[in-house]
Amino acid sequence: MKKITFPAIGLLCFTLLALFITPLYLNVGFCSGVWAFLRVAALAVSWASGALCIVNMHRLRFSEPVIGCALFMHAIFTIFILLEVFFMYYPYTFVSGKTLSSKLWVKWYWHTNSLGYRDEEVRLPEANSTCNIVVAGDSFTAGVGINQPEMRFTNVLQSKLPAGYRVFNLGVPGADTPDEYQNLLNFPARADLIVLVHYVNDAEYLTKIPDTTSAKPQVKNKKEEWFLVKQSFFINYIYYKSMELMQKWQFAAHFKNQNASLYEYLCSNESTRQLSETCFIQPACMEKHLQNLHRFADYANEQCVPLVVILFPKLTNDFIDFSNTYINKPITAQLQLWDIDVFNVYEIARVLPEYKRRVNRSDYHPSALLHTTTASRFNDFLQLNHILPLDCPVAGN
């Protein structure tokens, strides 16, 4: 029986070794090539151990049903290994950045400068001798899901501007409006034009403050993931894909049963209280958020530079019209009262099919197509509103 036991133990041990190597492989810059090789090698050895176990079963004249069952299980294990190796090299972003494929995407495509931004280095004093457009925002600005930074709207805008102009991208994933304001204050280069990119979840911080809205603070559901979900690329991908589909189905089924508008649904259902969209239909919450937005206007006035706000709607078909009607339009009305120019991406995004306006079907961030189109229209907007050319210390401007 040793000829069966030892290969079986080898299969188990080398499979576990491959799974335990997962976080080491994902560790950016930590000999990732070596860990990738070791992980694939461990999976290969575990497969060979399984094959040896079946060969020995045949030599020891096990019954045909037992050998057939072992062959079937090994075939399943072979498919698992092939898929596991495939997903080891398949960077794919989800709404949740904690998926293994999202972490792999970060490992491959997310490179930051010394200030922590996904942008070129800020070199002083050279940066203060150009016309500087400083763009503050969150992951929409940073370009999560966009493999090449050159495809983001800030980089495309840069390519359309004349020599002597520089667009700085201050996008930080997870940043809310107060964070973006601090990033702007701490930026070392002079700003000749401030651009604030606003998205629905920029008010998410207010859902955690009880006295700003009647909505309950967000409570994270801290479910402990299974070991295989945390360590296996293939199982992790399937798990989060199935969770995503389940959530969509539950929302669609619940919303359909309510027989109400999306506005009424968000107002009347306790389960939606944690959504940042709900904050905007609460007067106290909206007022607080507008106060934080006004800080950008005050800062721009102090620096004597123009401020432009770009408003992105939520890019899913379920919420795109709602986010424009109940979020972007009220914010636009207030900003215009403060003499702030507003560029609403809604009309650009609305004409695109949902799958073309998003980076992929599991991620709500803007696609490269939407980034490119937004940059072109925004450049025209700046020209038509006489915001460009800027009044800055560059010859010819």
Image (cartoon, rainbow, N blue to C red):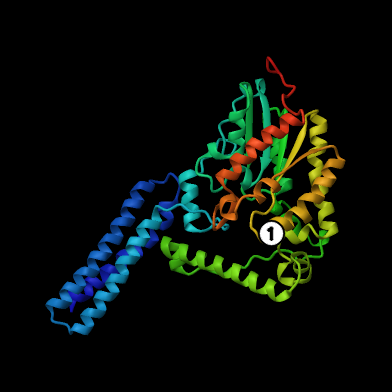
Q: Where is residue 300 in the image (x, y as percent from the top left)?
A: 79, 33
In-front residue for pair 218/390: 390
Instruction: Determine the residue positioned at 68% across, 66% down.
Output: 219
Residue neighbourhood size for the residue with mark 1, other residues' Cα within 10 Å, grouped as few (<14), some (14–19), many (≥20): some
Name the one closer to the observer, 20 or 215: 215
Snapshot quadrant of residue 87: bottom left
Location of the C terminus (image quadrant): top right
Total marks shown come to 1
In this view of the protein, which residue sits in the foreground, 205 or 136?
136
Q: Residue type at mark 1? A: Phe
Give left or right: position of 374 versus 215.
left
- Is residue 322 something that shows in the picture? yes
In percent of width and height, residue 132 lies at 67, 27
Note whether 229 is above or below 67 in the view shown: above
At 85% from the left edge and 57% from the top edge, which residue is drawn?
A: 284
Q: In the image, is residue 124 above or below residue 178?
A: above
Residue 158 in picture, x, y percent from top left: 61, 30
- According to the picture, the residue beneath numbered tag 1 turns out to be 319
| Secondary structure at numbered mark 1 | loop
